[in-house]
Image: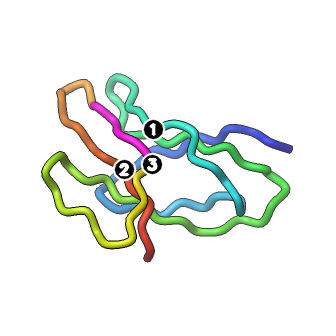
Amino acid sequence: MKRIWKYELRGITNNVEVPQGGIVRHVSALPSCPPTLWIEVDDIRPLTERYFRSIATGGTIPDQAVYVGTAILSDGTVWHVHEVNP
């Protein structure tokens, strides 16, 4: 069954278990929360590990990284989230 799952990104690089084929639908930060991904998943699919990196404005983007969205924290910090290879 399709659902939207929420994943909080607690560091610069995060690995998350997502059902295969999951699609990132939104990146944001709620007040007093870290950057967060909302991913559309089919919860009967097997889990796979995916890797996301939060990069500050002006930071270096790794080769092959795929941009998925930007989160602006309540303190004004801006993180650009990319999916990366492990």
Residue named by callout 3 = 68
CB under 8 Å between discs 2 and 3: yes
Q: Quadrant of residue 72?
A: top left
> Which residue: 16% across, 56% down?
59
Mark 1 lies on a secondary structure that is: strand
CB under 8 Å between discs 2 and 1: yes
Mark 1 or mark 3, which is nearer to you?
Answer: 3
Q: Residues within 10 Å of mark 1 (few under 14, many from 20)?
A: many
Label number found at residue 27: 1
Write down the region rendered in magenta: 68-72
Residue named by callout 2 = 81
Left or right: where 59 falls relative to 8: left
Picture coordinates of residue 70, whole percent (x, y): 35, 39
Q: Residues within 10 Å of mark 3 (few under 14, many from 20)?
A: some
Amino acid marked by disc 3: Val
Amino acid marked by disc 2: Val
Mark 3 or mark 2, which is nearer the start of the sequence?
Answer: 3
Left or right: where 4 falls relative to 43: left
Front residue of 45/61: it is 61
User: Residues under labels 1 and 3: Cα distance?
Assistant: 7 Å
User: Residues under labels 2 and 1: Cα distance?
Assistant: 8 Å
Q: What kind of colouring is applied to the model shown? A: rainbow
Q: Residues within 10 Å of mark 2 (few under 14, many from 20)?
A: many
Extreme-bottom residue of the structure:
86
Q: Is residue 47 magenta?
A: no
Mark 2 lies on a secondary structure that is: strand
Amino acid marked by disc 1: Val
CB under 8 Å between discs 1 and 3: yes
Extreme-left residue of the structure:
58
